[in-house]
């Protein structure tokens, strides 16, 4: 797929699978339990004031990790004349499992919603679109177990960004450092006439609906 426009995607969804952040509190509890058991076995009971300081330090480390993952940015949004590609480039043997290819023929509507970091893009698929099936509950449970045991290697799975939402199948992309109008102008000459491009307010009230913004037209 050719690339005419690229943008940064905010958050861990471009590289990490669904549910990854929920494992951080679990890891914190496991670390506390292991350290407490090892300390009691070696040095005896722990003073209450030391426990408080240790727990505060671990909680602060977990908050830092959560904030970093929640605001990390990756180039994971690419648009071309053939469609939209979601996901970070990968050198793995099967990079297609780390990315989602949305052809213009499968896209019905694009909604652009302003956010403080840039915008939220909602890509709604048509009724005949080829949709990646969601993981079943047993497979998701096995994935979570794999991520819990080996968080870096085993159980990484497909990134959340590449999985469509089940309600009216669509994708949600948090794009940084781009204004809604800039994205609408970039998408308008690439998207077919059948794809509606709609700009909304923060409360999802329609602000403007158009297929070819005047700013995207070539000068006479």
Image (cartoon, helix red, strand yellow):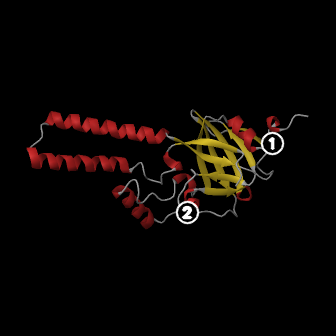
From the top left corner, tell me how far across and down residue 163 is, in percent. Answer: 56, 57
Compared with 55, 146 (above or below) is below
Instruction: Name the foreground residue: 77 vs 116.
Output: 77
Q: Are marks 2 and 1 in contact (CB under 8 Å)?
A: no
- The residue that label 2 is drawn on is 94
From the top left corner, tell me how far across and down residue 105 is, in percent. Answer: 74, 58
The crowd level at tag 2 (other Cα within 10 Å; few <14, some 14-19, many 20+) is few
SS for callout 1: loop
Q: Which quarter of the image is occupied by the C terminus? A: top right
Mark-to-mark CA distance, 2 and 1:
36 Å
Q: Which of the numbered marks, if any, corresponds to residue 183?
A: none
Instruction: Name the foreground residue: 155 vs 202.
Output: 155
Mark 2 or 1: the one toward you: 2
Regarding residue 167, the answer to whether it shows in the image is no
Residue drawn where x is 21% and y is 50% of the image? 34
Rendering quarter of residue 106: bottom right
Residue drawn where x is 48% and y is 66% of the image? 136
- The residue that label 1 is drawn on is 212
| In this picture, residue 35 sits left or right of residue 197 | left
From the top left corner, tell me how far across and down residue 148 is, in percent. Answer: 35, 56
Residue drawn where x is 50% and y is 64% of the image? 135
Rendering quarter of residue 45: top left
| In this picture, residue 41 sits left or right of residue 174 | left
Q: Residue furthest left?
A: 44
Regarding residue 113, the answer to whether it shows in the image is yes
| Between discs 2 and 1, the one toward the N terminus | 2
Q: Which quarter of the image is occupied by the N terminus? A: bottom right
SS for callout 2: loop
Instruction: Name the foreground residue: 187 vs 116.
Output: 187
Residue drawn where x is 64% and y is 52% of the image? 85
């Amino acid at each position: 797929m050719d690339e005419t426009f690229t943008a940064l995607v905010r958050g861990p969804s471009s590289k990490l699978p669904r549910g990854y952040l929920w494992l951080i509190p679990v890891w914190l509890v496991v670390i506390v339990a292991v350290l407490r058991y090892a300390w009691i076995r070696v040095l005896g009971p722990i003073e209450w004031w030391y426990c408080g300081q240790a727990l505060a330090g671990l909680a602060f480390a977990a908050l830092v990790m959560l904030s970093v993952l929640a605001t990390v940015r990756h180039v994971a949004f690419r648009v071309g004349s053939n469609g939209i590609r979601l996901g970070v480039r990968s050198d793995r043997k099967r990079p297609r499992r780390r990315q989602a290819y949305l052809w213009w023929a499968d896209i019905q509507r694009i909604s652009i919603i302003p956010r403080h970091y840039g915008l939220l893009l909602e890509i709604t698929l048509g009724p005949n679109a080829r949709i990646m099936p969601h993981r079943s509950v047993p497979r998701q449970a096995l994935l979570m177990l794999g991520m819990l045991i080996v968080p870096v290697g085993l159980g990484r799975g497909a990134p959340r960004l590449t999985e469509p939402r089940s309600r009216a199948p669509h994708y949600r992309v948090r794009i940084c450092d781009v204004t809604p109008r800039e994205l609408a102008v970039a998408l308008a000459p690439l998207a077919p006439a059948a794809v509606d491009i709609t700009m909304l307010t923060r409360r999802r009230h329609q602000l403007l609906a158009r297929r070819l913004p005047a700013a995207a037209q070539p000068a006479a």
